Image (cartoon, rainbow, N blue to C red):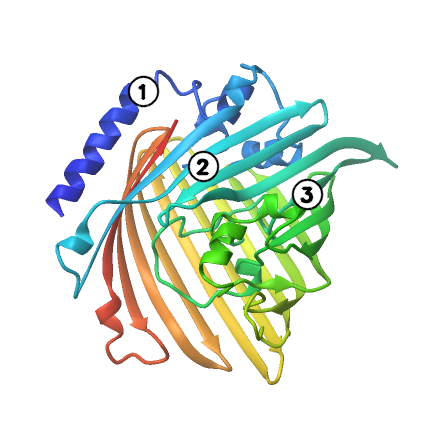
Amino acid sequence: MKTSLKYLAAGALLAAALVDNANAIPAFARQTGLNCSACHTVFPELTQTGRDFKLHGYTTEGGDTSLASKFAAMIQVTSTMNKHSTAADHALKIPQSSIFFGGKITDHVGAFVQTTLDDAGIFGADNMDFRYANSTKAKGMFIDYGFTVNNSPTVQDLWNSTSAWGYPYAGGVNNGGTKLDGLDNVVGLGAYAMWNNWLYTEFDAYKGSKASGLLNVFHFSTDTAANIKDIGGAGYDYADGISPYARIALQHNFGDNYVMVGAQYLRSKVIGHYYDPTPDAAVTYKDHAFDAEWQYNHGDHLITAQASKTWETQSGGATDKLETNKAKISYFYKQKYGITLDYVSDSLNSATQNAGTTVQFDYVPTEKIRLAAQFNNYTKFGGTSVGASDNNNVFLIGWFMF
């Protein structure tokens, strides 16, 4: 553990030496001329300014608008220690390193593009969101509206209560994922509108993409054609037909507080192991979810909380019901010292499978460096509490943004 901490500290010093000031990078900070803290509580969580920037298509300016300024990079460095781990397991790892392109393309068009090198050595597309955004007035109502092309439901979402940008950002207690937690190998086209800055509505239609062809450019890094060939097609899910997704949310600012409550719906028909000689039978997934977010920002004190509950019905040869629950609250002092408490659980056909809590301590020496120590505690694992604690772990992570 001492060795891991030593290397994390060394990485922090290196990143600090490479960052001149808060406005240098990443790309969005350079384009807007704002500090990272204007758009983020602590990255990657968004403030109201950050949500507005995304709503308006990543096009807000005020700083450096050169092509070079639109590129940024991120490296994650981690170490995991659990009850039965060995010294080799504690070795420092780089599970993810990414290159980003982001910002304004034209007056009304912008993009967020993340490409990632994962821990298997595969480089390719990760989160992608291309937007057209505009605004108008109708019968005294101010409307921000736009269109999005993205590669998974919630990548385009404005809030950190949904899966793509929700806690935990790395590590955490594992729980069963619904299709709202990741409908992979798809490309979606959606339309959205914010009505008088309080009611948000969105509808997207997702189409499955195969291992080759034009839409393959949107695939996540481990779903490239070369990798699928190497593993014989194992694990490749194909969304058959059109998968509709709907989102609604109400938001309001009052004083130092911000609140949002929302709901989501997704229906998808998925064929698992699509490239195997005998693919899985198609399964239809119907997801309904409620989520909420609260932020309090006063002086040196910052509190953020998110919660979500998802019900998923899986209809194939049989009908199964998966339910997931997530709740998280964090406190930061001067956006530098933080503590986060998190709870997750999932149940299959009313029987709890995994459940547990996370306590995370953060230190943010600069706006582009985040060092954290997680303590993950399982109360249930694999459907039983017997031996669940054997999966408890300490997880160290360093995030370095350039």
Q: Position of residue 337 (x, y in %)?
A: 29, 37
Name which of mark 3 and mark 1 comes first in the sequence: 1
Label ID, residue 149: 3
Q: Position of residue 157 (x, y in %)?
A: 60, 46
Marker count (numbered): 3
Which callout, 2 or 3, points to the residue nearer the camera?
3
Dot 2 amino acid type: Asn
Q: Position of residue 54 (x, y in %)?
A: 61, 35
Cβ–Cβ below 8 Å for labels 2 and 3?
no
Identify which residue, 307 or 168, lies in the foreground.
168
- Give the residue displayed 22% in from the left and 70% down from the top: 390
- Give the residue displayed 52% in from the left and 60% down from the top: 308
- Tell whether 360 sits left or right of 168: left
Dot 1 amino acid type: Leu
**Against 88, is 121 above or below?**
above
- Tell whether 48 sits left or right of 116: right
- Give the residue displayed 54% in from the left and 58% down from the top: 182
Dot 3 amino acid type: Val
Label ID, residue 18: 1
- Give the residue displayed 56% in from the left and 29% down from the top: 102
- Per the model, the C-alpha gap separating discs 2 and 3 is 32 Å
Cβ–Cβ below 8 Å for labels 3 and 1?
no
Disc 1 secondary structure class: helix
Q: Quickly name the residue at label 2.
A: 297
- Give the residue at the far right of this rendering: 139
- Tell whether 329 sits left or right of 49: left
Q: Residues within 10 Å of mark 2 (few under 14, many from 20)?
A: some
Name which of mark 2 and mark 3 comes first in the sequence: 3
- Residue 179 visible in the current orientation: yes
Q: Residues within 10 Å of mark 3 (few under 14, many from 20)?
A: many
**Against 93, is 113 above or below?**
above
Cβ–Cβ below 8 Å for labels 1 and 2?
no
